[in-house]
Each structure stands twice: as C-alpha cells, then as structure tokens.
Amino acid sequence: MLLTIFFCALGLALVLVVASATSLYLDRKRLFTLADGAALAGAEMWNLDEVRVDDGALSVELDDARVLRAANDYLGDAVHELDAVELVEATSSDGRTATVTLRAVWHAPISTDLIPVAVPIEVTATARSVFH
C-alpha cells in the first residue's frame, strides 16, 4: 500500500513537471515569434529614397531610432498572451541588420514548492534587409 502511494505521488509529480516544461517551451516559442516579427519590422523600416547603389548592389542604412520605433509599433499592434512583455533592446549594429531582444515572465500552470511560480524568459531575434 505504501509503495502504491509513493508511485502515485511520483507519477503525479512527473506529470506536473512535464506540463510545466511544455508550458515554458511554448511561451518561449511565442516570445521568439513576437521578437522575430519585431526584428523583421525593424529591418524593413527604410524609405525608398534612402536606397543607395554601391558597386552595382542596392543597400540601405538602418539606424537605431527607426528600428526601435518599428519594434515598438509592432509590439503595440501584435496580439499575444504573454505576461509582462518588455522590449529590452532594438538596434542595428551594421546598418543592415535589426536585432530585437524581448523579455517576458512565465508563470507555472500549477504552482507548487517544487516548481517556481514565475521565471523570466528572454529571447533575441535578428532580421536583415536584403535587396535582389
């Protein structure tokens, strides 16, 4: 009888850990999708009159202020179910690539002493303006 109770408790704990790990994974993927969209919006934040022709190739210079504005606009319009989404960084280090870092808080579906109540998650996505 004691062994049966122990195995039932162990099985329940295993189910709770797997459910929490799955929830954390899915929230991280949702946050990464949001960051990817914000980075793409930042990478495409240029005007047609700013396009240059260098050695037969088209290029454009992104600046940090435009990338930040585009990422903020995207996050303001995007629909998501994440808690406490924060734009940590939105920059363009080389003038062609937009990098966006987002942070959110994950909450465990079932809170116990073994599983923390909330965990911060952070992702970084990069998008590049490419002309053909």
Image (cartoon, helix red, strand yellow):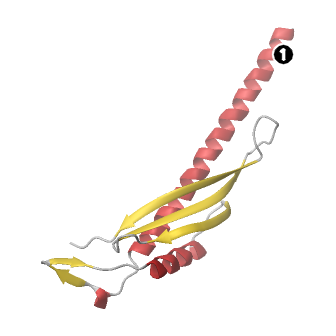
Tell me the residue at 62%/41% (across/down): 22
Residue sticking out furthest to the front: 93
Tell me the residue at 51%/74% (across/down): 71
List x then y, in percent, for residue 116.
76, 42
Tell me the residue at 54%/68% (across/down): 89
Figure check: 59 above or below 93: below
Based on the displayed image, in which of its 4 quarters is residue 5 positioned?
top right
Residue sticking out furthest to the bottom: 49
List x then y, in percent, for residue 70.
49, 78
Based on the displayed image, in which of its 4 quarters is residue 10 positioned?
top right
Judge by depth and name the residue closer to the eye, 104 or 23: 104
**Type of amino acid under label 1:** Ile
- The secondary element bearing badge 1 is classed as helix
List x then y, in percent, for residue 122.
58, 55
Tell me the residue at 54%/78% (across/down): 73
Label 1 CA crowd tier, 10 Å (few <14, some 14–19, many 20+): few
Figure check: 114 above or below 1: below
Figure check: 9 above or below 18: above
> Is 33 on the left or on the right of 111, as rendered?
left
Instruction: Point out the image quarter for the N terminus.
Output: top right
Residue sticking out furthest to the left: 56
> Total marks drawn?
1
List x then y, in percent, for residue 110.
78, 42
Instruction: Point out the image quarter for the C terminus.
Output: bottom left
Residue underneath mark 1: 5
> Is 12 on the left or on the right of 51, as rendered?
right
